[in-house]
Image (cartoon, rainbow, N blue to C red):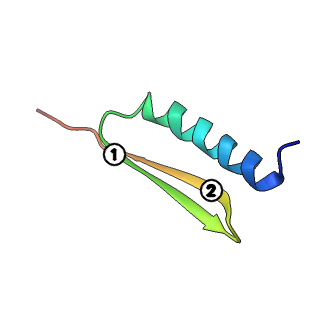
């Protein structure tokens, strides 16, 4: 059986992978409280050429 913390980390990593596939330029920030990922923030930048 997988413990809650490992399940939380796996869920966060799945979400980060999905975001990485959609963002060309920007940043991803993980908010962690009590050793759990509680929020994922995505900031995308649009480059004008």
Q: CA distance from mark 1 to mark 2?
A: 17 Å
**Circle 2 is placed at which residue position?**
39
User: Which residue is situated farthest in the right direction here?
Assistant: 1
Residue name at image x 59 percent, y 42 percent: 13
| Residue 33 position (above or below residue 8) | below
The picture quadrant where one finds residue 31 is bottom right
| Residue 34 position (above or below residue 26) | below
Q: Is residue 25 left or right of residue 8?
A: left
User: Which residue is situated farthest in the top direction here?
Assistant: 21
Q: Residues within 10 Å of mark 2 (few under 14, many from 20)?
A: few
Q: Position of residue 38 (x, y in %)?
A: 68, 59
Label at residue 26:
1
Residue name at image x 32 percent, y 33 percent: 24
Q: Is residue 33 left or right of residue 31?
A: right
Check disc 2 and report its element: helix, strand or loop: strand
In front: 1, or 40? Answer: 1
Residue name at image x 57 percent, y 52 percent: 40
Figure disc tally: 2
User: Which residue is situated farthest in the bottom direction here?
Assistant: 34
Q: Is residue 13 left or right of residue 4?
A: left
| Residue 43 position (above or below residue 34) | above
Looking at the rendered image, the quarter that the C terminus falls into is top left
Q: Position of residue 26 (x, y in %)?
A: 33, 45
């Amino acid at each position: 059986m997988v413990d809650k913390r490992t399940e939380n980390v796996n869920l966060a990593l799945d979400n980060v992978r999905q975001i990485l596939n959609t963002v060309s330029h920007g940043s991803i920030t993980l908010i962690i409280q009590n050793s759990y990922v509680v929020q994922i923030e995505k900031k995308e930048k649009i480059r004008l050429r």
